[in-house]
Image (cartoon, rainbow, N blue to C red):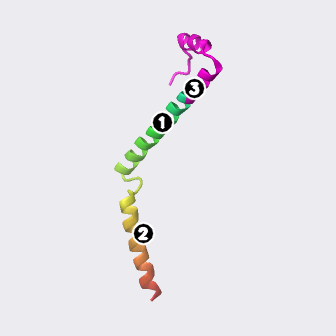
């Protein structure tokens, strides 16, 4: 992502009053957070698909099997 502020954007921001600037800033932060969450979700889905990490269903199955083995070994 190129980090250049568009001149038109900057000129429009300068026209805003303080409370309007706060709303724009909050919106931008929310937009960036959403983009980051989506990027991480995509990366997680790719990792699961490629077998780098387990799905929750697979993890739960493994955990239940581990608990059963643990109980059996304690008897």
Q: Which mark is residue 57?
A: none
Residue at numbered disc 3: 23
Secondary structure of the residue carrying numbered label 3: helix
Region of the chain picked out in magenta, as a range: 1-26
Q: State the residue at coordinates (60%, 15%).
A: 16
**Quarter of the picture holding the C terminus:** bottom left
What is the C-alpha distance between the residues marked 3 and 2? 46 Å
Image vertical order of residue 50 relative to residue 6, above or below: below
Residue at numbered disc 2: 63
Q: Residue furthest bottom?
A: 75
- Front residue of 2/31: it is 31
What is the C-alpha distance between the residues marked 1 and 3? 16 Å
Task: Assess whether residue 22 is covered by the magenta stretch.
Answer: yes
Secondary structure of the residue carrying numbered label 2: helix
Residue 57 is situated, as x and y percent measured from the top left of the image, at 36, 61
Task: Assess whether residue 47 is covered by the magenta stretch.
Answer: no
Q: Residues within 10 Å of mark 2 (few under 14, many from 20)?
A: few
Residue at numbered disc 1: 34
In the image, is 15 to the left or to the right of 52? right
Question: In terms of sequence position, does the residue under pointer 1 or pointer 3 come before the other?
Answer: 3
Q: State the residue at coordinates (45%, 38%).
A: 39
Instruction: Nearest to the eye among marks 3 and 2: give it.
Output: 3
What is the C-alpha distance between the residues marked 1 and 2? 32 Å
Q: How many marks?
A: 3
Q: Residue furthest right?
A: 18
SS assignment for the magenta stretch, majority = helix
Question: In terms of sequence position, does the residue under pointer 1 or pointer 2 come before the other?
Answer: 1
Task: Tell me if I can see residue 50 in this picture.
Answer: no
């Amino acid at each position: 992502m190129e980090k250049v502020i568009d001149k038109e954007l900057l000129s429009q921001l300068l026209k805003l009053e303080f409370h309007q600037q706060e709303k724009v800033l909050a919106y931008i932060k929310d937009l960036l957070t959403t983009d980051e969450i989506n990027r991480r979700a995509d990366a997680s889905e790719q990792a699961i698909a490629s077998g780098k990490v387990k799905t929750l269903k697979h993890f739960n199955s493994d955990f239940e099997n581990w608990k059963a083995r643990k109980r059996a070994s304690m008897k």
